[in-house]
Image: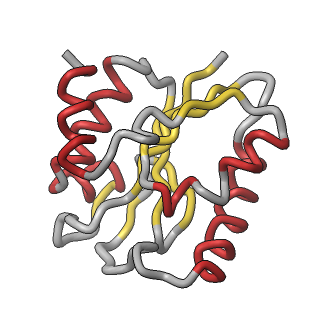
């Protein structure tokens, strides 16, 4: 079974074109989620859910952008999730991959029902952990 970390994109980004994993390193949340992915999940691979690009591999080269799902109407979030889910279902196998979604509710809320319906093994470690401060604290406590 492959452990696949899927980290949500963040507002804070580097100001230049680079690998996705580097682009988001400006964000403390992303840094802590990445550490958790490597140390605790022991991720075999890391992907990012991007508000602009949907599902991208951590090594994909992308330009900085200023798009978020936060504040978007439900219809746009559903449309985004449908595209992202299609990419995920094409990429990951429910029999061979366990998915760990490290992202906010706007990113997983319409994907999680598809994971359930399609019998994926998955976890959303930060689900129900409160706001940003609580999530950062939880990641610190669980990534020792």
Q: Position of residue 35 (x, y in %)?
A: 26, 29
Residue nearer the viewer, 72 or 134: 134
**Compared with residue 124, is residue 65 higher up or lower down, i.e. above or below?**
below
Q: Residue at x 51, y 69 (%)?
A: 53
* Residue in the image at 26% along x and 56% along y: 24
Horizontal side of 118 relative to 1 (left or right) equals right
Residue 116 in the image: x percent, y percent? 77, 39
Residue sitting at 46 percent across and 38 percent down?
A: 46
Left or right, 20 with respect to 77, comes to: left
| Front-most of residues 86 and 73 | 73
Q: Residue at x 35, y 39 (%)?
A: 129
Q: Nearer the viewer, residue 77 or 22?
A: 77
Q: Quadrant of the N terminus?
A: top right
Spot occupied by residue 87 in the image (x, y as percentages of width and height):
70, 56
Q: Quadrant of residue 86?
A: bottom right
Residue at the farthest right position:
118
Q: Quadrant of the C terminus?
A: top left
Q: Position of residue 20 (x, y in %)?
A: 36, 55
**Residue 61's image quarter?**
bottom left
């Amino acid at each position: 079974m492959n452990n696949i970390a899927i980290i949500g994109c963040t507002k804070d980004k580097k100001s230049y074109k680079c690998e996705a994993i580097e682009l988001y390193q400006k964000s403390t949340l992303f840094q802590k989620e990445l550490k958790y992915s490597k140390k605790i999940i022991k991720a075999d691979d890391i992907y990012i859910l991007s508000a602009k690009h949907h599902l991208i591999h951590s090594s994909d080269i992308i330009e900085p952008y200023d798009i978020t799902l936060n504040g978007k109407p439900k219809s746009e979030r559903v449309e985004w999730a449908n595209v992202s889910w299609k990419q995920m279902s094409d990429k990951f196998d429910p029999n061979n991959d366990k998915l760990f979604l490290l992202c906010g509710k706007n990113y997983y809320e319409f994907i999680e029902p598809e994971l359930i319906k399609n019998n994926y093994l998955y976890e959303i470690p930060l689900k129900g952990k409160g706001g940003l401060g609580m999530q950062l604290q939880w990641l610190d406590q669980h990534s020792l």
